[in-house]
Image: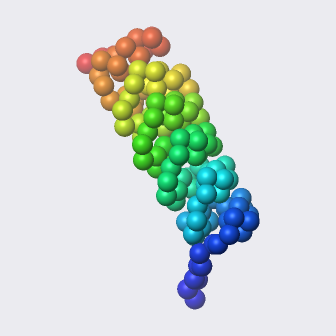
Amino acid sequence: MQLKFQAIVGIEASLKAVERNGDALQYVKDQSEAVCLKAVESDGDALRYVKDQSEAVCLKAVERNGDALQYVKDQSEAVCLKAVESDGDALRYVKDQSEAVCLKAVERNGYALQYVLKFDLFVKIAGIFNIEVVN
């Protein structure tokens, strides 16, 4: 038996659907900001179904689940910081790693140091946390 899904139409029906399950956003025909916010509040990974990603929706998604950063189309410094504050390992999805973002990620989770891409930044942050770097 194959399930068929219909598009969810109407603001009320959309809000109820995504509140129960953020992934229902993929079936919402007209995605308002309110519906998208409700979806990512329910499940940060629902960001993958947001057609027009606003800063507010992205911030809410990564606050709920730092790994949702992988679905952010245009990563701002604020969104990246919020993601690594939520989960230091989200650093692996940061496209343009600033010192502030890397430092925050490693403060949150020391193992995030492995995701620092720039060697000089890696060495600097390792030094801050008294981690010896061996060549």
Image quarter of the C terminus: top left
Compared to 2, does 86 lie above or below? Answer: above
Residue 53 coordinates in the image, percent (x, y): 50, 49
Between 34 and 4, the residue placed more toward the observer is 34
Pick the residue in front: 102 or 26.
26
Quadrant showing the N terminus = bottom right
Nearer to me, 121 or 38: 38
Q: Residue at x 40, y 11 (%)?
A: 127
Report whether 23 appears left or right of 122. Answer: right
| Colour scheme shown | rainbow
In the current view of this chain or complex, which residue is farthest to the bottom? Answer: 1
Above or below 113: residue 34: below
Residue for point 46% across, 46% down: 72
Q: Is residue 10 above or below residue 98?
A: below
Relative placement, left or right, of 111 versus 15 is left
Residue at the spot x=41%, y=20% of the render? 99
Q: From the viewer's perspective, tell me whether residue 116 is left or right of residue 49.
A: left
Residue 94 figure quarter: top left
Kindly tell me whether residue 84 is visible in this rendering: no
Q: Residue at x 37, y 14 (%)?
A: 124
Residue 90 x/y as whole percent: 48, 38
Residue 42 placed where, x, y %?
67, 53
Number of marks in picture: 0
Residue 134 visible within the image:
yes
Q: Who is closer to the viewer here, 123 or 94?
A: 94
Q: Position of residue 49 (x, y in %)?
A: 52, 59
